């Protein structure tokens, strides 16, 4: 089940925090791995980790002023792709910090990266998201989003590792081939 209570708490908290001046500023949030977040091995379930990353992205959008624009325009947010690395386990009741930031954008998508950090300073996981805003006609180009936010920012240069991922995704077959049993 999606963590609606946590989402509400995090959005209310983000509302009280200062707005982020730069689109690429880092939003930091703090969390705990609760029993309902655990998998069979008593560590943060990989699917739940992605749901928790939703919390960070939504709070980031709140602090950037994007949530108000979404409501005003009737737009939605969607995820168009992810690349995730899990490197350290987060155990039950363990506290962790999540860092979320907008990395860059191109003519169609917004690229975000997020990470979870354990109390000892180790990075537990890192995810790159290709996201978009949508309306009834489909994807909304980032320049139109920025205009609706009252901004005229230009994208920071796309990091090489992100560009390589974007290129690899462009080469990936879609739809995928039918798997045979």
Image (cartoon, helix red, strand yellow):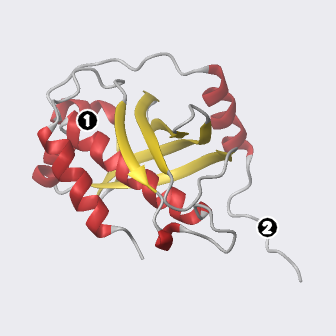
Q: Which residue is labeled 2 in the image?
A: 177
User: For this view, does 49 lie left or right of residue 46?
Assistant: left
Camera-side residue of 83 and 165 = 83
Q: Note whether residue 109 is visible.
A: no
x, y percentage for residue 120? 57, 34
Tell me the quarter of the picture where residue 149 sits: top left
The residue identified by callout 1 is: 144
Q: Where is residue 132 in the image (x, y as percent from the top left)?
A: 40, 47
Q: Which residue lies furthest to the right in this view?
A: 181
Q: Quadrant of residue 38?
A: bottom right
Quarter of the figure with residue 2: bottom left
- Point out residue 50 in the picture as x, y percentages from the top left corner: 51, 57
Placement of the C terminus among the 4 image quadrants: bottom right
Under circle 1, the secondary element is helix
Q: Is residue 129 above or below residue 146?
A: below
Q: Residue at x 21, y 21 (%)?
A: 21
Which quarter of the figure is the N terminus placed in?
bottom left
Instruction: Count residues near mark 2 (Cα–Cα under 10 Å), then give few for <14, some for 14-19, many for 20+.
Output: few
* Left-right relation of 105 to 65: right
Q: What element carries label 2?
A: loop
């Amino acid at each position: 089940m999606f963590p609606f209570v946590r989402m509400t708490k995090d959005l209310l908290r983000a509302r009280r925090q200062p707005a982020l001046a730069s689109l690429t500023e880092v939003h930091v949030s703090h969390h705990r791995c609760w029993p309902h977040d655990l998998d069979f091995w008593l560590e943060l379930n990989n699917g739940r980790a992605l749901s928790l990353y939703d919390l960070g992205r939504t709070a980031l959008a709140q602090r950037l002023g994007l949530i108000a624009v979404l409501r005003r325009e009737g737009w939605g947010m969607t995820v168009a792709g992810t690349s995730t690395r899990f490197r350290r386990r987060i155990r039950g009741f363990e506290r962790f910090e999540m860092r979320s930031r907008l990395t860059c954008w191109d003519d169609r998508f917004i690229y975000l990266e997020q990470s979870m950090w354990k109390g000892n300073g180790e990075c537990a996981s890192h995810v790159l998201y290709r996201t978009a805003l949508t309306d009834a006609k489909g994807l909304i180009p980032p320049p139109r989003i920025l205009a609706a936010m009252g901004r005229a920012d230009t994208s920071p240069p796309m990091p090489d590792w992100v560009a390589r991922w974007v290129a690899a995704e462009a080469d990936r077959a879609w739809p995928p081939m039918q798997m045979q049993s």
